[in-house]
């Protein structure tokens, strides 16, 4: 990501700590320059997304406080995130299953 000027930000919304650790490792293996922000709750993630520019969202579809799919719809309603990539994840025991949009 040299020469881009800003560090791309990824917002991970996941309430399972084991999933957070695995996804963080995966992202660091791709590029250590990526900035990973994390939230355990959809409400906090929505507020954070309004305060900071996010380049990629990774959303748990089964959050304890909210459905990740509903959060994705809310984020799409914000003009600045109309075309921002959103990955939806589901943590199944020892595996992380990724689906995208």
Image (cartoon, grey):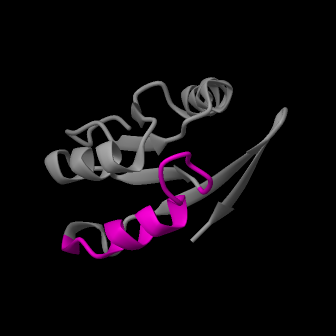
Please identify the residue farthest to the right as the structure is shown: 94
Q: Position of residue 32 (x, y in %)?
A: 47, 24
Q: Which residue is painted at 22% across and 48% down in the image?
A: 47
Please identify the residue farthest to the front as the structure is shown: 65
Drawn side of residue 8 relative to residue 100, left or right: left
Looking at the image, is 101 positioned above or below residue 6?
A: below
Q: Which residue is painted at 42% across and 53% down in the image?
A: 56
For the residue pair 11 and 91, the one nearer the viewer reads as 91
Q: Which residue is painted at 62% across and 65% down in the image?
A: 100
Q: Position of residue 25 (x, y in %)?
A: 62, 25
Q: Is residue 96 magenta?
A: no
Looking at the image, is 3 positioned above or below residue 32?
A: below
Q: Which residue is painted at 68% across and 25% down in the image?
A: 18
Q: Position of residue 86 (x, y in %)?
A: 49, 61
Looking at the image, is 78 positioned above or below residue 88?
A: below
| Magenta part of the chain | 61-79
Drawn side of residue 91 relative to residue 62, left or right: right
Drawn side of residue 43 relative to residue 85, left or right: left
Check the picture and name the quadrant holding the N terminus.
Answer: top left
Which quadrant holds residue 41? Answer: top left
Q: Is residue 76 magenta?
A: yes
Q: Position of residue 94 (x, y in %)?
A: 84, 32
């Amino acid at each position: 990501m040299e020469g881009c000027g800003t560090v791309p930000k990824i917002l991970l919304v996941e309430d399972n700590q084991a999933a957070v650790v695995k996804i963080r490792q995966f992202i660091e293996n791709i590029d250590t320059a990526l900035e990973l922000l994390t939230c355990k709750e959809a409400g906090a993630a929505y507020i954070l997304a309004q305060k900071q520019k996010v380049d990629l969202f990774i959303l748990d579809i089964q959050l304890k406080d909210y459905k990740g799919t509903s959060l994705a719809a809310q984020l799409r309603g914000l003009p600045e995130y109309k075309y921002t990539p959103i990955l939806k994840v589901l943590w199944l025991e020892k595996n992380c299953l990724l689906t995208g949009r």
